[in-house]
Image (cartoon, rainbow, N blue to C red):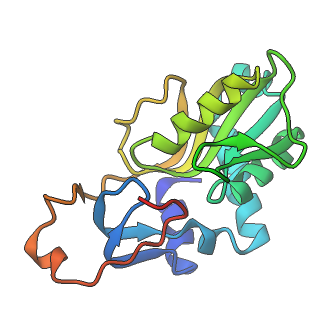
Amino acid sequence: MTEDEVLAEFRASHALLEGHFQLSSGRHSAYYLQCARVLMNAERAATLARALVHKLPRDIRTQIEKVVSPAMGGVIIGHEVGRALEVDAVFVERPTGTFEFRRGFDMKPGEKVLLVEDVVTTGLSSREAIKAINAEGGEVIAAAALVDRSAGEVDLGVPLFTLVEINFPTYGPDEVPPELAAKPIEKPGSRKA
């Protein structure tokens, strides 16, 4: 899929929102990608996952033994990527503020992992998830996301493969332009900033 085709899927599902959003990272933006909307259609989710898997170089793709995603945003796309790769897909969650494996999910020592996210902005959630995976003995060999909001600037410490790189401007709490500050703030992310 081309970037234009991927963005067309976001537009068709009304997943590209405009307003004043406080992102999970704590930064502010006039745009928000609600990946849950683009993934609510199972066929669309499967198509996007297959396209994401095709972005992975063969040498990485053939090593992957498990897909791990951070809850909540990465769960659906992670599951579909696991299906496309024909490997198990599990997730980490933050019941007490720090990512951990629950629900009987675990890692084998040295297990090769693909971390899968819906959207990467600052990489904070991804790096926290990688830390949890490493603590359980897994080895993250690459990461994949539908959207890279950093336009290629984020560093996760592993290669990152995405369907779309977007650079919507984001602002720190003290940098919000007056026209954006005049709009009511929405906090659509799954993590409290």
Q: Is residue 88 visible?
A: yes
Tell me if 72 is positioned left or right of 33 in this view.
right
The mark tally for this picture is 0
Residue 60 quadrant = top right
Q: Observer-nearest residue: 141 or 161?
A: 141
Q: Is residue 161 visible?
A: no
How far across and how far down the image is residue 111, in percent? Answer: 81, 21
Tell me if 186 is positioned left or right of 59 in this view.
left
Instruction: Pick out the residue farthest to the left.
Output: 178
Q: Observer-nearest residue: 151 or 158?
A: 158
Q: Residue at x 57, y 70 (%)?
A: 9
Q: Residue at x 60, y 40 (%)?
A: 144
Residue 154 quadrant = top left
How far across and how far down the image is residue 103, in percent? Answer: 87, 49
Vertical comparison of 186 with 192: above or below: below
Residue 6 quadrant = bottom right
Specify the quadrant that holds the C terminus: bottom left
Tell me if 1 is positioned left or right of 123 in this view.
right
Tell me if 17 is positioned left or right of 84 in this view.
left
Q: Residue at x 75, y 23 (%)?
A: 138
Instruction: Pick out the residue farthest to the front.
Output: 96
How far across and how far down the image is residue 192, in percent? Answer: 47, 61
Vertical comparison of 46 with 97: above or below: below
